[in-house]
Amino acid sequence: MTHAQGPSDSPSCRPPVSWGEQFPRRPGTLAAASADDLADLYLVSYPSGAAAADLSDAQQEIAATFRGEFGILRTDASATAWIDHHPVGAVMVVERSIWDEGLEGPFIIDLFVSPQARGRGVGRSLVQHAVQICALAGDAALSLRIGGGTSPAALAIYASLGFANSD
């Protein structure tokens, strides 16, 4: 795994795209979606073998996230995206990585977008939301991990928003 950091003051870290044009509402909080909806979305968003093996596993992962097992959830920077009153994407941010001792500041533990919503700016808008909220909170950087389960589309989003490998 490698890490990527995006400085909060990067000129490429812009506010989210116009939610009114592409999406029926502004990014929703994680609480706007039920845990079951998030688990369903999580399961269908990743290729087989990259995340949850089945719905029960996905439900356990989402529950563990809300219990803080992967770090203290930053509910201000975490968000959901919606189309036609259905959640189609989510970004989950914690206060700091539990996997990387020397890594300070907020950390994206998950970004997932349903296959039907890909290519519509959902992932980019969710990451931009997280960057913007962390910058407004005074955080110097927002970090994430990239690895085998990271899609080429996600890698392109991160690079275009100024995230750079730190390893």
Image: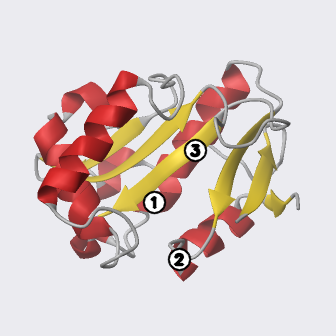
**Which of 23/148 is in front?**
148
Q: Which mark is residue 153?
A: 2
Residue at the image position 48 percent from the left and 22 percent from the top = 76
Residue 152 to residue 44: above or below: below
User: Where does the N terminus fall, quadrant-wise?
Assistant: bottom right
Comparing labels 3 and 1, the label whose residue is closer to the camera: 3
Which residue, given by chain and number where applicable, does mark 3 sit on? 108
Q: Secondary structure beneath disc 3?
A: strand
Q: Position of residue 123 (x, y in %)?
A: 45, 60
Note whether residue 17 is visible.
no
Note whether residue 166 is visible.
yes
Residue 166 to residue 78: above or below: below
Residue at the image position 54 percent from the left and 28 percent from the top = 71
Horizontal side of 28 relative to 10 (left or right) equals left
Q: Which mark is residue 123?
A: 1
Residues at marks 3 and 1, CA–CA distance in whole angstroms: 12 Å
Q: Decide: marks 2, 1 in contact (CB < 8 A)?
A: yes
Q: Position of residue 126 (x, y in %)?
A: 47, 48
Residue at the image position 23 percent from the left and 53 percent from the top = 58
Q: Decide: marks 3, 2 in contact (CB < 8 A)?
A: no
Q: Residues within 10 Å of mark 1 (few under 14, many from 20)?
A: many
Of callouts 3 and 2, which one flags the residue occurring earlier in the amino acid sequence? 3
Q: Secondary structure beneath disc 1?
A: helix
Amino acid type for the residue under numbered disc 3: Ile
Amino acid type for the residue under numbered disc 1: Gly
Q: Position of residue 122 (x, y in %)?
A: 40, 59
